[in-house]
Every structure is written in structure tokens, then in C-alpha cells.
Image (cartoon, rainbow, N blue to C red):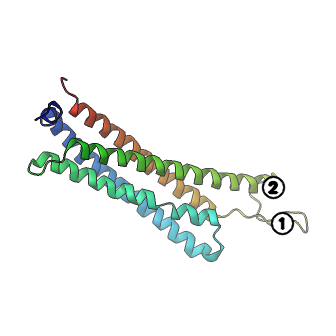
Amino acid sequence: MTKTIAAWNDARTKGLAAALMRFGKIGFWIQLVLLIAIALLGGYVLKVAGGRAALGNILSFLGLVLPLFTTLWCRRYAALGKALSGGADTPSPAMVGRSLWVGVWAGAAGVVVTLISLLGAASGLMVTLLANPQVGVAVATISPGGADYQISAVDALSLMSLLLTQTAELMVVAMSLRLVFLFARSIRTGG
């Protein structure tokens, strides 16, 4: 048995297993609640706006593929923790490390996609507000023959869903990086 494998079988591995199970369960349930809230907001948008929903609003709800993946990946963390603590079919350090880095990169990709969507939605809202007279939220321009600009509750719901998605993805990145740290510490030899 190599030094790395020997170090992998000590008490630090039990701490990593407990952290994997704990963070896996917490990440799964928090993200699931946020995904349900986002799905309800999306359903409301489609019901109210129907075919009038802007492309940016629809894309913000279609961007849920990565958060759905990271939600399921958190379940994988819990399963890895259970396998590490069970002992019979203990995963190798390489497999655990790969799984943790997949979680980091998936969460980071979700953050980037959501950030781009947030910037697009906020830019659209800003352009609409700047194009209208500075008296509040205008539904249509005052000058005859001008283009109509609208800001509706759908825009606010779209931004709220993006913020909830961003929250979930940042949580996954933070938890995954913590797990990577615990993993690295558990396989470090001589410490």
C-alpha cells in the first residue's frame, strides 16, 4: 500500500466522509427548495405572459439545467461520503477528487451563465428605464408615434429567479471548494 493510500485510510477520511454527507444533504435540499421556487416563478411567468414573455425571460428559466445538475451532484457527494464511511467498497482518492472538481466546475459554470443572464436582464431593464421619461415606471412613451416600452412583473420575476439561481450556484461552489480542501488535507502524507 502506498503512502497516499495509507494516509487515505486514517481518521481524516472519516472527517471527509462526514463532511461529504453533511454538505451533500444540505446542498441538495437547499438547491431543491430554490429550484422549486424558481419553477413556480417560471410557471407564473408562462401563465401570465404566455407568448409575450421576452426571450431573456425565457432563457433565464431555461438556464436551470446547470442548477439541476448541481442539485443531483450534491446527492453524489452524500453517496460518496456514505461509501467512504461504509468501508466495503471505498472509492479511490482519485475518484473522490474528480467528483469534487466536477462539482466545483459545474457550480462555477452555473455562476458564469447566471451572471451573464443577470447582466443581460439588468441591461434590458436599464435601457427601458432610460428610454422613458424620468417620472417613474412608464408603460408607454408620452410622445405620439414613439415606440412603446414596457416593464412588467415578469421582468422582476425573471430577475428574482436569476438571483435565486446565482445563490444556489455560489453555495455549491463554496461547499465544493471546502470539500476539495478537506479532501486534499485527508490525502496529504506526513500531516
Relative horizontal placement of residue 168, taking residue 85 as reference (left or right): right
Q: Quadrant of the C terminus?
A: top left
Residue at the (53%, 52%) spot, across then down: 114
Q: Quadrant of the N terminus?
A: top left
Which numbered disc flags the more N-terminal residue, 2 or 1?
A: 2
Residue at the (19%, 27%) spot, across then down: 189
Q: Quadrant of residue 124?
A: bottom right
Q: Image height check: is 99 above or below 149? A: above
Q: Residue 147 — which label?
A: 1
Of 127 and 68, the residue lying toward us: 68
The x, y position of residue 96, in whole percent, is 25, 45
Of 15 and 31, the residue lying toward us: 15
Please state which amino acid type lies under the numbered disc 2: Ala
Can residue 42 be seen in the rendering of this structure?
yes
Relative horizontal placement of residue 36, taking residue 52 as reference (left or right): left
Please state which amino acid type lies under the numbered disc 1: Ala
Q: Secondary structure at mark 1?
A: loop
Residue at the (62%, 50%) spot, across then down: 119
Give yes or no for contact between labels 2 and 1 (Cβ–Cβ under 8 Å): yes
The x, y position of residue 74, in whole percent, is 31, 52
Residue at the (65%, 67%) spot, across then down: 54
Relative horizontal placement of residue 130, taking residue 98 as reference (left or right): right
Q: Residues within 10 Å of mark 2 (few under 14, many from 20)?
A: some
Residue at image mark 2 = 131
Q: Secondary structure at mark 2?
A: helix
